[in-house]
Image (cartoon, rainbow, N blue to C red):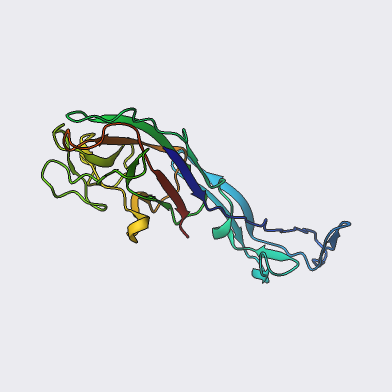
Amino acid sequence: MTKQALLWGCAWMITWTSYHLALSPVLAERLESDSYVIQFGNFNVTAGEKESASYKVTDTVGQTGAGPYGQYGVSSYFVGGGFQYIYQIDQFAFSISKLAIDLGELTAGAHNTDALTLSITTGGAGGYAIYTYETKPLTHENGSNTIADTTCDSGTCSESSAGLWTNTSIGGFGFNATGSSDVSSDFLTTDHFRQFADSSAAESMQAIMSSNDIVENETATITYKAGLNSASQAAGRYDTATVFVAVPGY
């Protein structure tokens, strides 16, 4: 099986601030190069980075003429003057440890598994969410046989709710997510599985990890599991594609 990841990122601009301190009246500075001109620099109360063991803050206090000027990606320029809440703390990054999952030959009375690791770092104060879905049901290499998404041991798990799945006589296809406090709370143990939402059946992708906070190298293990429901199902290799979508919050 192949994996695809859609990454959404953000670009930020730097706030420019100049200082002039003298016993004589304060005069505005003119800063320029071959590519820019900044006029009317101003005197601020304070600016910079403050931090301790538990926080890190950047600020610009006393900014005159604060505000966004121009429109990023549309205008020929953009200046974010004094708006430290859009200060870039870190790069938004999302990675998947491998792009191929190998469940081997599927047979009746057995569950086959394989796993990958998701890793995310956010720079926005609004946190993030990671969603996932499958592009089609798990399909035999002959193209005609499929394996339905698991309903777990109790027959109640779904795209949005995990259930216990340990009975090898119950087949299907599903996944588990563990290893991070940001993982959805319905994954109670490593034996609790969900169905993948099926985009070919117009099912909506579902969130599996989320946080309202900034995170750095937050990781989770995604374990895939599949099995046949009976000996009458075609044994062999099956495939589909799953997609993970990482969305920053603001």
Residue 235, image x, y percentages: 26, 32
User: In which quadrant of the rendered view does residue 111 lie?
Assistant: top left
* Residue 33, above or below 65: above
Task: Report the number of discs.
Answer: 0
Seen from the viewer's position, the closer of residues 46 and 16 is: 16
In the current view of this chain or complex, which residue is farthest to the right?
A: 34
**Quadrant assignment for the N terminus:** top left
Q: Tell me the residue at 10%/44% (across/down).
A: 154
Q: Position of residue 85 (x, y in %)?
A: 54, 59
Identify which residue is drawn at 57% across, 59% down: 86
Coordinates of residue 218 in the picture (x, y in percent): 42, 39
Relative to the observer, which residue lies in front, 70 or 131? 131
Q: Residue at x 80, y 59 (%)?
A: 22
Q: Foreground residue, 145 or 133? A: 145
Question: Is residue 160 shown left or right of residue 63?
Answer: left
Depth order, front residue of 2/30: 2
Q: Is residue 121 visible to us here? A: no
Q: Residue at x 66, y 69 (%)?
A: 71
**Residue 145 falls in image quadrant:** top left
Q: Position of residue 186 (x, y in %)?
A: 22, 46
Residue 170 seen anywhere in this rendered image of the structure: yes
Q: Return the residue found at the far left.
A: 154
